[in-house]
Amino acid sequence: MRVLIVGGGRVGRALATRLEDRDEEVIIIENDDDQLERLREMGFIAHRGDGTERETLREAGAANASVIAVTTDNDDVNMLVAQIARNSFDVDTVIARVNMPANMDAFRDLDVEIVQSSMSIAHEMDNRIERPAISEWMTELDRTGDVQEIEVTADTVVGRTVSELSSELPEDVHLALLSRDGESRIPHADDTLHEGDHITFIGRTGAVSDALDYCHTE
């Protein structure tokens, strides 16, 4: 998966680090020279330019990106980049950081995925208060585990039941979610997997990687 991140600040760097840890191809667009030098010193592939300009996005490889993520602390910038990305490039996913709650509806009108900064923090704090065990487990998963979604296309998966597939996966990975026709649910052992389904694996990083490799085998 090729991901283009617009904004090399704290959020952009953290996102890039997580994606690169999963061996995704990441390019960061940044227009501040000091920030750009820092990114390159940290080992990131960084492209100098203004992400609100269509040509900058094109030069950075937007036409070949699977995801464009906009992470700056300026909603006007994020909105403009998201609009250009959605309207000018055939990108599967455009996701934008929203800093001010009052701007949520404007971002939704762009038909992009959104993450609202203050709400994300509030959810995390609520989990710490009301669901400490789950919160601790998710923190541990963040360090040593992974969650990955994949579309069912391979012959090794199509037509198999969840039980059959699970029996051939590593011990430290679980098939946690089945998504079909816009609906997601916990899979049943006797569910038959169809081409075009999306399945989500959760578990230790290496085991999740092995499961994805198995399901990608044609």
Image (cartoon, helix red, strand yellow):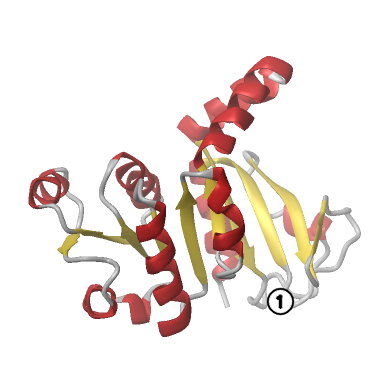
Answer whether residue 214 is visible to the viewer in this image: yes
Question: For residue 215, what is the image quadrant?
Answer: bottom right
- Residue visible at 60% across and 21% down in the picture: 136
Question: For residue 4, what is the image quadrant?
Answer: bottom left
Between 209 and 147, the one nearer to me in the picture: 147
- Count the marks: how many? 1
- Residue visible at 67% across and 71% down in the picture: 152
Instruction: Judge left or right: residue 76 versus residue 166.
Output: left
Quarter that holds the N terminus = bottom left
Instruction: Judge left or right: residue 181 versus residue 23.
Output: right
Percent x, y of residue 51: 27, 66
Percent x, y of residue 57: 28, 74
Work out whether 113 lies above or below 13. below
Work out whether 155 lies above or below 106. below
Instruction: Judge left or right: residue 213 versus residue 130.
Output: left
- Residue visible at 59% across and 70% down in the picture: 111
Between 156 and 70, the one nearer to me in the picture: 70
Please name the residue that numbered disc 1 is placed on.
196
Quarter that holds the C terminus = bottom right
Percent x, y of residue 47: 17, 64
Work out whether 57 lies above or below 207. below
Instruction: Judge left or right: residue 108 versus residue 45.
Output: right
Q: Residues within 10 Å of mark 1 (few under 14, many from 20)?
A: some
- Residue visible at 25% across and 50% down in the picture: 8
Q: Amino acid at mark 1?
A: Gly
**Helix, strand or loop for disc 1:** loop
Residue at the front extreme of this rendering? 102
Percent x, y of residue 196: 71, 76
Answer whether residue 1 is visible to the viewer in this image: no
Work out whether 217 lies above or below 172. below
